[in-house]
Structures are given as structure tokens and as C-alpha cells.
Image: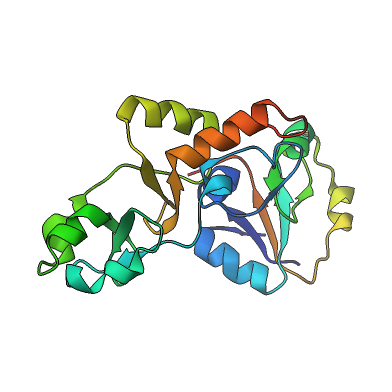
Amino acid sequence: MTVERIGIDRLHELLAKGAQLVDALPAEEYEKLHIAGAVSLPIEDFQREHVDRLNRSNPIVTYCADTQ
Amino acid sequence: MPEVYEYIGGIAEWSAFGLPLEGQDSDALTAGSLALRVFPTCRPDESVGDLGGRFGEHTVCAVVDHDGIFLGRLRQVDVDKHPESLAVDFMTVGASTFRPDVPATEMAEWLNKRELDEFFITTPDGKVFGILYRSAVEHILEHAESSDGISQT
């Protein structure tokens, strides 16, 4: 599986098509602040079954604090 | 197999655009949350004399290009004095701006040091997000300090 790195314009396009936002930051950071509508799947304790929470028919967009 | 993407700007860039956030800290007072979103704008090649009615209660106008990119600020006092000129002749080029995610307390300190009464809020792509007046920042911070349930960062 390939993961395409995208900027904010492409993100807006995908969100308009129903993409799901996944916050990969630690859970305590998600509790403090996250992008509106994002779900929390912390990369530090990521497990395969967590993906079951997502709708695989829609695009999935992950993000961290800043990876630019 | 689902399509998977990584948004490289992350929450840092999203916040800097003043876009919606959720969570315990999402109601923090910031430049974006305090900014007035309706403000006067003009192009640099517009005649200053045509702008008078556009200011309303504002004391400055954002000079922007055709894409809405911030170029500078134009004061109403200059408009009144030089109605026959172009905006580019009297605008302050490269005026300092804040991003929407800058904490209100940080803005207040900066404003006091610079003795500015107002400034524009711009997003990372250079577009104008809003305008903020020192008096409004100070008033809201004073109110927030005396109220429970309003967080400052």
C-alpha cells in the first residue's frame, strides 16, 4: 500500500468527498486539540484491528503535528 | 484496499489557517477567534478617493492582490488627505501580521511593545483572515481574566 503525502488544498478536496481524518498523535494530545471531525488512532499503540473503526470505502487521511 | 494519504501540514498548519478544531483547548483565545472577519480591502491600483465609503468604522484597509494575498495596509487618514492618489502610493508595504493560531496573550504583549492599534491576521498562504484591534484584545482579555470557563493560552 502506498501513502501519498498531500497538502492542505488536496486535503480539502478529499474531505469534500467524505475522507476520514485520523489523528496519529498520542491520545492525550488528541484530547487537548485535534482537527474537527478527526478520530484518534495513536501511532504509538496502533493495532491492526483499530482500522476496523474506519470505513474502508472512503479515503483515509492521517496527520501528526507537522511533518513538513 | 482504502486510499490512504498523509496530510503533511498536520495540526500545526491547520491551526495556522484558523480552521475548526475540537478538544479541551479548542476554545482558547487566539488571533483567529478574536478577529473581525468583515473588513475593508482594496487593490493597490485603486484610486484612494474611491475608498472612503468602504472603511465604515474601520481605520485601516487591507491592500490585496487579485488572489486576495495581503500586500500592505492603508490608513484612513491617508485616504482623507490624498483622495487623488492610488492606494499603492500610501500603503505600508510588508506590514506585520499574525497567524490565526497565535495566543491572545502573546498578541497583547506584542501590540503593547509596538504601540499598534490594529493589525491584520493572515493565513500561511498570505490571504487575509481578519482584522484585530488592540482595544478589542485588551477588553476581551480583561473580561476573560474575571470569568470562569474561558481559557487563555
Rendered image quadrant of residue B119:
top left
Residue A46 x, y percent position in the rendering = 80, 41
Residue B138 x, y percent position in the rendering = 51, 33
Could one spot residue B79 in this view of the protein? yes
Residue B110 x, y percent position in the rendering = 39, 29
Residue B78 x, y percent position in the rendering = 18, 55
Residue at x 75% of width, y 70% of height: A58
Q: Would you place residue B53 above or below residue A35 in this image? A: below
Could one spot residue B67 in this view of the protein? no
Q: Would you place residue B115 above or below residue A36 in this image? A: above
Q: Quadrant of the N terminus of chain B?
A: bottom right
Rendered image quadrant of residue A12:
bottom right
Residue at x 55% of width, y 42% of height: B12
Q: Would you place residue A32 above or below residue B71 in this image? A: above
Q: Is residue B13 left or right of residue A33?
A: left
Q: Quadrant of the C terminus of chain B?
A: top right
Residue at x 65% of width, y 37% of height: B28
